[in-house]
Amino acid sequence: MTTTREALGVGIDRLRAAAVDTPRLDAEVLFAYIAGVDRTGILAHPEALVSDGQLAAFQRVVERRGAGEPVAYIRGMKEFHGLALRVDPRALIPRPETERLVDLGLAETMWRLAEGPRQPGALPVRIADVGTGSGAVAVALAVALRQRRVPAEDVTILATDVSADALDLARENAVSHAVGDRVGFVEADLLPPGSVACDVVLANLPYVRSAAMSDLPRPTTYEPPSALDGGVDGLTVIARLLDRLPAVLVPGGVALLEIGADQGEAIGVLLDDRLPGWPARVETDLTGLPRVAVISRPPS
Ligand code: GLN
């Protein structure tokens, strides 16, 4: 019989040979997934015996990872903002840096509920998560609001996506985190046509330059290109959303848009062109890189 340590060793060697960036971590996570335990469990018991069935299953997932498939798609799960989200090729795998977008959106929402322009008995704070994909941002925000005991009727969250498949996944995530009543889903290119009044717009739209798509790491090629490809300058889809903002954001409303780490200056130029006079700043992520453009509609 094989021990956990031996099985892991073979898996790590295989992933290293396949030039996977983090062979040990990936092998441990995949072994834990197959064994149905958490990673600390396998590290604590390296002598535990592995059945032939488990070994074969582990070897199969190691082969998939070695061929380039992301760990998150193999497990069908990704941790995001403290939640276990279902993920599959219908949508982008949520990235840790996008947690910043959730935190900024949460702060904006709490401020508006507490002391912002909203009066008691006024309309709910209306939020849109544009291009929701797996639903990560909308679901994490809804869960965070519930944890803060914000009544469901005080905030509306509209999650949109142009992909019906992504929306199905987002709905599954909302239901499995018990916020199906707090998030509405609409299939739309950015936002539904006609009148949508929002206090807060959140979006992690595609922002990779088309020419850089072929340089993306191998696992990223398993993700939907439409969730990543932001056109020639990477900002084409974001620019389309900027053009909608005057008709969507209420006076005093704010849009929080995730951008690429190298797009801090380019977004400034684009904003001067599309929304002159609208105050804007760029928030950095935990690594200190530009990550979220914060764009306010001046109060009327
Ligand atoms: N941060 C992602 C990546 O680098 C891009 C996400 C996006 O385009 N919104 O793969």
Image (spheres, rainbow, N blue to C red):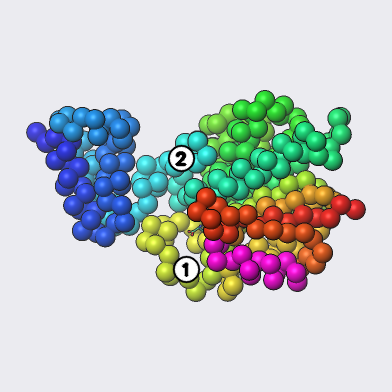
Q: Is residue 99 above or below residue 263?
A: above
Give residue 79's mark: 2
Tell me if I can see residue 226 in this picture.
Answer: no
Q: Which residues are magenta?
A: 260-273
What element does badge 1 sit on? helix
Query: Mark 1, residues whose alpha carbon is within 10 Å: few (<14), some, or many (≥20)?
Result: some
Residue 33: image x %, image y %?
A: 32, 37
Left/right of residue 35 with respect to residue 50 in the rendered view:
right
- Furthest-left residue in this view: 1
Left/right of residue 142 with respect to residue 196 in the rendered view:
left
Image depth: mark 1 or mark 2 in front: 2
Residue at the image position 69 percent from the left and 58 percent from the top: 281
Left/right of residue 118 with respect to residue 213 in the rendered view:
right
- As for residue 78 lying within the magenta part, the answer is no
Circle nearer the N terminus (1, 2): 2
Q: Amino acid at mark 2?
A: Glu
Query: Mark 2, residues whose alpha carbon is within 10 Å: few (<14), some, or many (≥20)?
Result: some
- As for residue 266 lying within the magenta part, the answer is yes
Q: Nearer the viewer, residue 64 or 291?
A: 291
Q: Nearer the viewer, residue 82 or 228?
A: 82
Tell me which corner region of the image, top left, top right, bottom left or bottom right, holds residue 231: bottom right
Residue at the image position 48 percent from the left and 71 percent from the top: 212
